[in-house]
Amino acid sequence: MVRMCIKLKISSVGMYSIEGCQSPSFLLSNCIITMSLTNEQLDQLKREYATLMMDAMDYKSMEQFVFDTIYDNLEMAREDELKEDIKDLCGDDVLTDLLNNLS
């Protein structure tokens, strides 16, 4: 991991400028950093941010996130697709049990 030290200057209009850098700009009001990244850098940033988000979650938050993500992915499934997915993943008996438990 490369770390770099920078000096920030705050202008009277609330913008940051960075000494020693090529083109990043900082918007003070939203703390948004704008820089051009390569595709590889963007992918790495996404992975590292996802890891930070995951590390910050407690067990219940992570459980809820996983449930919401799975449910959102199933929301647009047609009945026949859903039944087939359940059968393929869990077997006929589980599908039958789930259908029998419906009110």
Image (cartoon, helix red, strand yellow):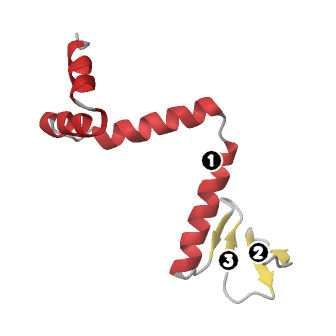
Q: How far apart, in angstroms, are the residues tagged by discs 2 and 1?
A: 20 Å
Q: Nearer the viewer, residue 15 or 80?
A: 80
Q: Residue at x 30, y 38 (%)?
A: 89
Name the amino acid type tagged 1: Met
Viewed as shown, does residue 4 lie left or right of 99? right
Q: Quadrant of the N terminus?
A: bottom right
Q: Nearer the viewer, residue 100 or 58?
A: 100
Q: Residue at x 83, y 75 (%)?
A: 8
| Helix, strand or loop status at disc 2 | loop
Answer few, some or many: residues within 10 Å of disc 3's Cα (few below 14, many 20 plus, some between 14 and 19). some
Residue 59, given in percent of the width and then of the height, sits at 63, 32
Name the residue beneath numbered marker 3: 25
Residue 85, given in percent of the width and then of the height, sits at 24, 39
Residue 13, given in percent of the width and then of the height, sits at 73, 70
Q: Nearer the viewer, residue 101 or 66?
A: 101
| Helix, strand or loop status at disc 1 | helix
Q: How far apart, in angstroms, are the residues tagged by discs 3 and 1?
A: 28 Å
Viewed as shown, does residue 98 lie left or right of 4? left
- Nearer-N-terminus badge (3/1): 3
The answer to whether residue 30 is above or below residue 2 is: above
Front tag of 3 and 1: 1
Name the amino acid type tagged 3: Ser
Q: How far apart, in angstroms, are the residues tagged by discs 3 and 2?
A: 22 Å
